[in-house]
Image (cartoon, coloured by chain):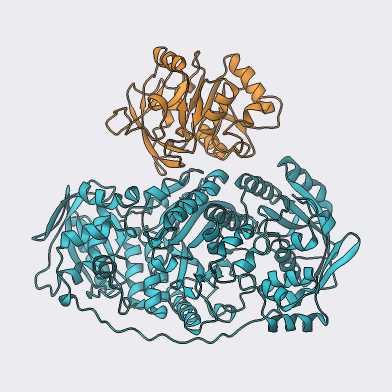
Amino acid sequence: MKITNTVVEKHGLKLEEYSKIKELLGREPNLLELGVFSAMWNEHCSYKSSRIHLKNLPTSGKQVIQGPGENAGVIDIGDDDAIIFKIESHNHPSYIEPYQGAATGVGGILRDVFTMGARPIALLNSIHFGSPDHPKTKSLLNGVVSGIGGYGNCIGVPTVAGEIKFNSSYNENILVNAMAVGHAKKDKIFYSKAKGLNKSVVYVGSKTGRDGIHGASMASAEFDENSEDKKPTVQVGDPFTEKLLMEACLELMKDNSIISIQDMGAAGLTSSSVEMASKGDLGMELNLDKVPCREENMTPYEMMLSESQERMLLILEDEKEKDARKIFEKWDLDFVVIGKTTNTNNLTLKFEGKIAGEIPIDALTTKAPIYDRKWIKKKLPERKTQIKDLKKIKLEDALLKILSSANQSNKSWVTDQFDQMVMTDTVQKSGSDASIIRIHKKKKAIAVSVDSSANYCKAHPLTGGKQIVCENWRNLISVGAKPIAITNCLNFGNPENSKIMGEFAECLLGIKKACEFLDFPVVSGNVSLYNGTNKKNIYPTPVIGGVGLIQNIDNRINQYLKKDGNIILQIGKNFGQLSQSVFLDEIYSIIDGPPPEINLSNEKNNGLSVLKLINDKLVSSVHDVSSGGLLVALAEMTFKSSYGIKIDRPKNLSNLMEHYFSEDQGRYLIEVKPDNLSKINNTLNENNIFSEIVGIVQKDYFEVTGELKIKINELCKANNTWYNNY
Amino acid sequence: MNSSVIVFPGSNCDRDIAVALEKLQFQNKMVWHKDSSLPKSDLIVIPGGFSYGDYLRSGAIAGKSNILNEVVKAANEGCLVLGICNGFQILTETGLLKGVLLRNKNLKFLGKDVNVKTINTENKFCNKYKKNQILKLNIAHNEGNYFTSKEHLKELEDKNLIPFKYCDEEGNINEESNPNGSLNNIAGIFNEKKNILGLMPHPERMVDKVVSNDDGINLFTSLLD
């Protein structure tokens, strides 16, 4: 086949990139080689637009064992325990085929974690859909939710937390981000770097089929009206085989037989072999006749570009091959030596006795294009809407409308489709600020949460980037965990547009600033660009997945009210800022102005003080004030509790709505016994923290004096209706 | 008491049940599905999960596996057998328990805590429970909708072979308190000799107050006497 300009473009490569390929090879590539280049040089695998911004993120710290660059990040949680975690996107495939797209997203991220030696202990997800009225939303929601459940439930890893949001910017390009968290022993962590010459390269797992060919290239382009045609590029998941692969790998890892291990994710056999060789500064020769195939007459091109799931590549110690083979046979999986490491620094592909392709490894990796794309800054938008100009609404009506909206309502319709309890260490399930997973047979636990705020990021990317890190930090603190590190999934539109590239650059700068200030490093992550259809880009949607440590599980706390007569204190100041709030959006359909300001120093001070109060056992419940503001946060504390709150309406309020629905940051609500109040005030005063009493816990009713009085079960009902009526 | 847990490649509650059994002082052994003999056992547990992927039908292939022949033999000789979730499905596939488990009535996977009422406590598995006690147990299944013939259903009711039924917080057994569409709100059944119990809820997830509650403990401690 002659390589014409059309063939090059069909591979997602620009003509100038093709010229560079010819220059690096010193000749024209054949079709197989072009395919390999397209798999390695696409945005998804090469990070060519994002790399220069990513390198600014803080990635090290006292508790970081491994930062970005490996299959997943690794942190130290004391004793001999390590936590390995990462988040990844599967947006494009999930829009084309929601069930399989979401399922294989979960499968892929699980492999990233157990490849490194960890037994997965928790799954999380962040999913964004278009407007509920959009004709595709309902079926996409159904497909994605059952796909996530279908995979996680079967493999037996609990799906413990997540977020689901609706916004019309995702009408034609939904987001499906999956995060996996695993536990390993510190001295049993496995990496992808190849070592040693003439070592056997072993293929294990499922057979290779024709599914997912060009998946990574598909995920690196915008959609258009022909997106449906891309269905064959979506992989098909088999969680049962993944379970076998996971158990076999973990069994093999008990011994010291593995030199290097890499899962076959995006760009399959190509990226896994190149990755291992590149990190080890070696070459690799693959004999493609040996690749176990699911279908007949597969070509080298198809084998190298297939994204069939549930496959791994291993490099083993010479004398361990026999024992390793036994383990994989026990689990009924293929185990085939398909190649060896070489000193040529080339990727050499043999087929039917001939060399079918040969490419220098560095041409695929370090010499791949890197772009410093043009980007423009976004000015802080001005506040336009004045609350006094808007039609008045009753406090009760506003509260009920917000609680029963798609974005604020109870998500149990979704989470009931997930097994949250398998492994029997889920101490706190989803629906709280963060979920809690106990380390098996130990007294300590980790807290996990995923967060995003696309509206804020759209309004002002720099502030939005800071806010999502703070929000995540706050959520971990609110269950009594010390935040340790994050993973991020950066979902943006087309980077060739300087405004979109600006959103990326500035969100990242915000993330960097917040992470540095809060000592909350980024240890892994994933970038997903080109999210959009026909030039319509999604809102900038970076998603933060955070992990915190609870040293003693008895010190955990939740947001649900404990006893009547207790006092509710608000930590942090309320400035009455309503721009970009859920209130203006839900009640008046107004989205304008700046997002709430982030004051990192207050954020840190407030958070660490709340954590101290929790560890000193001075508080009965904690909840952070986030989207929806004070009144929504107070209402959320009554769910799953038999208590309500009597809230004192402050005198001299300039505006009731600004007071109760503002989304000013850095705030927490704490429930305290009256006896503990003076001790708590001492701690808060010592640290110069602003606090005020907002209400008293009472039986049965949620009440704002002189404004509203609702039975708590009515409040709960309002929060539970949306999904059941959708 | 000696217990054996059968482990299929796709079992995923095998560790949880082993933890529960050991915590409650059983001498437990794990038995791999390719093994052809069982260790000496007073209790055999078939745990939850997806046995062989459950592609044909939940439990269908597991029901034909080597080790299951041994389980059937032991069961027929009176050994106590407990099938939880996928284990219940497998027991119906082997014929040790009659009836089938169909897709949940809402056609969705259901993972949540439900209320379950103890109906028959005069048997080896439930004697530590009080009659009509309301338990909170976790369910996690796609196919938990128990179905059987009219004649068999009558036999189950008449011979008191239904130890557990789904109910609401007050103990009412009705359509609203039926999570998956099971006939007569059935959550678990016995064979006629009451040495074989199959149930959809997971008692092994309810033995630790840090994680949930301890409503599942009595199912295991009942067996110890």
Question: Outermost residue toward the front?
Answer: A225
Residue visible at 18% across and 63% down? A694
Whether residue B174 appears in this view of the structure is yes
In the image, is A269 to the left or to the right of A559? right
In the image, is A6 to the left or to the right of A633? right
Using the image, determine if residue A408 lies above or below residue B38.
below
Using the image, determine if residue A656 lies above or below residue A293.
below
Foreground: B123 or B152? B152
Whether residue A446 appears in this view of the structure is no
User: Which percent across, then down, holds residue A189?
Assistant: 65, 59
User: Which percent across, then down, holds residue A622?
Assistant: 30, 58
In the image, is A174 to the left or to the right of A265? left
> How many numbered dots are placed on residues in this image?
0
Using the image, determine if residue A417 lies above or below residue B189.
below
User: Which percent across, then down, holds residue B1?
Assistant: 55, 23
User: Which percent across, then down, holds residue A399?
Assistant: 21, 60
Foreground: A590 or A192? A590
In the image, is A150 to the left or to the right of A635? right
Question: Outermost residue toward the right?
Answer: A353
Foreground: A259 or A721? A721
Q: Which chain is orange?
A: B
Q: Specify the colour of chain A.
A: cyan
Using the image, determine if residue A453 lies above or below residue A309.
below
Q: Quadrant of residue A667?
A: bottom left
Residue visible at 62% across and 20% down? B72
Q: Quadrant of residue A72?
A: bottom right
* Quadrant of the snapshot with the N terminus of chain A: bottom right
